[in-house]
Amino acid sequence: MDDFVRNKLSEWGLSTLIETFKDQGINKDHFYDLEDEEIKELIPKVGPRKTFKRHFKLLKVLPSSPERIRPNFAAGNMDMDPREESSQCQSPSVKRKRPNSAAEESIMCEVNDIMKVVKMKLQNEKKTELNGFLKNKISDLETRKRMLVGVFGKTGAGKSSLINAIVGEKNLLPSGSVCACTSVMFKVEANNDNKKYEAEIEFIKKEEWKEELWFYKNLLDDDDNDAREKLTALYRKDWESKSVEELMDKKYFRGIPEFLTRNKKTLKCESAKELHDKIVKYVSASNEEDDGVRQYWPLVECVTVRLPNKELLQHVTLVDLAGNGDRNKSRDNMWKKMVGKCSTVWIVAEITRAASEKEAWEILQNANSLMGNGGECQRIHFICTKSDDVGVQSGADVRDLVLKRNQVAKRQVNKEFQKEYPQSSEQFSFEVFTVSGQEFANSVHLQPDDTEIPKLRNVLRSLNNNHSEALNYVSGARGILSLIQGTRCRGVADSKMQACRDLKEKMQHELEVLQKAIDEIYRTFERCLTEGVEESQDSCVGQMKSMLHPRGEKGSAFHNKLKFAVMNNGVFKAKNGRKKNINTTLSSELTGSIDKEFRMTFPNEDKSGPFKGAIDSFSLDTERMINTYKDVRLQLRFLKTEEDKLKTKLKKIIREDKKTVYSSLTATIEDNMQKCYTDAAEFKGVGSMEKMRSTINDHVHDQKDTMFQMAKDNMLGQLNELRGKILKKLQETLLESVQLSLGTDDCSFPDVSGELAMVEKFYNQLEANPNPN
């Protein structure tokens, strides 16, 4: 053993292993060549082994750098800034490379360990307001976010093969069978906890299934194949002769006791194939009606599959958004919520009819408002699958045929998108991919790059890039450590007092500027909505006529559709991807009046700040103040990181709240229309269709002078609440941070100069190149 190995083990808090490594004669060269099995033999205990492997991984992937520098920042010796000192140890001519994803993950783990140690130190100190404040700030650092990629497409479009190819698991989702039903949501993400293949199954509520059963038993159409498929899957032929109460008997749910107890069901397997065999009855309709196996997918709300060793999915979740919502309230709400959270959406269709695939385009149309102003989508990718299917099985010209048709398909789909969504280019980036999962796996005619699966994987890698997250995390830790160390300084009371006064004045000024900017935006929305109310009042009668007297639909067929709609809060049964909604039709003029302004005010693009950049413009200008108040520069550094972190948090709050603000227009209309739907649903027998029509028409006519005004007032009220929340959060959080960081002297705080220097080095490495390679 040499000093390098001894020092590393001591530095990583693993001094108890020094004798073991010494007995095995491990020097620096041996240390770098250790394999997983050797590490397991050397360190049999799981806890120390995990700690060792994390530090070991970081040591191997980080760019070469000088050994850690621990400048003395003890009280009274604050002349050297750690960033300045560390930079002196590196030649300016040497360009530092940005750490890769694995290094960034390891850096975050390393800094997390450092902050845990610091938090333990603070636990041993006297309980003060500042002490509690600092411990809370350390806890706040522990936040992670997954990016959601929503996958749309009808059964048979090749979604399963696509996902299999993307995640590199041939046996996970068998082609053509998973999510054959139109209700189960299917999520695929990385298992970051262990090496198992896991599935977590969430069920709908028992009360909701009972309500759904009643609906099917009383309003089942002869052509309602989806409902028949659901009932047959769970009950076989029993549903035809038994009552709702009999069908709720516990004997039908023996295989899923979790459904009755409202718990999630968890499955753990050693392989993807084993997991598939276990989950298929929860996600897929069987092709054999009398196979004797009861299927539970009608009761399932969501299935989350977690796969081991999938760095590509480290911070990304693929969500198969089967169908177009569902009659079940909880499933439909989850569907809408998930669509609203997707930052990227994949529309999947077979290449042979991608440009003319009505269902794919109609799904996109129906989800458009949920993804755009009502969501956070930034990218739409149209994926043409089965690109290798050109009708030729062999021959040297197969590849040329495939590539030529791919280019034609891309042009056609792009043209169709521009025709159908001319305004969407302002909100979404749109790209077409032509893929072949089969050729990617077998490479008979195409090279891997020809299949464009590698391109889609790169899309996920770009979403999975956690550089900014790592930088923000380390920056936050650096700020907290700076404040702790700066608080130990003595003899700087005058500087603190003056800096505190200047910061409060600056904060008040910036808050006033921000409020004026938001007030102007509020007035703009008010003008737009006033016009929207007038247009809604003028058009609502005509809208109802087209909804309730559709061309070509007469007699019992439309009677059943209308009966379904009034039983389903104004939503007609989806047919071939098309869904008509009385509420969204009535609110369309209101939403249309504000759509453009809303996109500019609350853009989904990360680089464009909400409220037209007003949040980004807010600044305490602490960096400039550092030159004036050098004695308290560590405290000012903390306030800078605190301000940045707060603005990031505010953007997340705004991103979530703006969905509610936008959807409030339709939600208000839906609430107002609820009574007439309930009344209309009571009619039965001869003449009931006309009575339903009259009830809805009369309600709209009587309410039009108030209903749309209420929707306008409700949205403006929510905007006002959001404005108040933002201003209050900014003022209270920053005022507390300023007062505690500059109004407290406590030299009894622990010396964290060593920890600060370590985090400083990591921060410099991450900041060296903020852009992906």
Image (cartoon, rainbow, N blue to C red):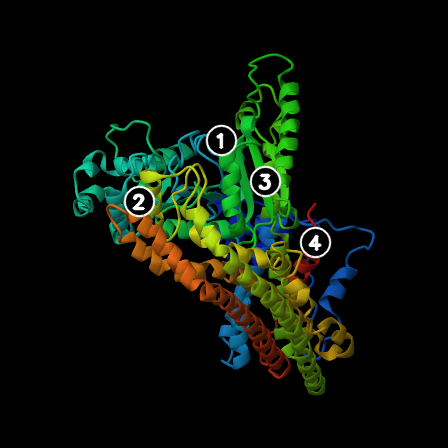
* Mark before the other along the chain sequence, 4 or 3: 3
Mark 4–mark 3 Cα distance, whole angstroms, equals 26 Å
Q: Mark 3 touching mark 2, by CB under 8 A?
A: no
Q: Is residue 212 left or right of residue 69?
A: left
Q: Nearer the viewer, residue 229 or 709?
A: 709
Q: Quick check: 426 above or below 172?
A: below
Looking at the figure, which quarter contains the C terminus? top right
* Mark before the other along the chain sequence, 1 or 3: 1
**Tag of residue 299:** 2
**Residue on which disc 3 sits:** 381
**Residue on which disc 4 sits:** 770
* Mark before the other along the chain sequence, 1 or 4: 1
Q: Amino acid at mark 3?
A: His
Kind of element beneath mark 4: loop
**Residue on which disc 1 sits:** 158
Q: Amino acid at mark 2?
A: Leu
Q: Mark 1 touching mark 2, by CB under 8 A?
A: no
Q: Amino acid at mark 1?
A: Gly
Q: Amino acid at mark 4?
A: Pro
Kind of element beneath mark 2: helix
Across and down, in percent, residue 585 comes to 48, 52
Mark 3–mark 2 Cα distance, whole angstroms, equals 31 Å
Q: Is residue 409 visible?
A: yes
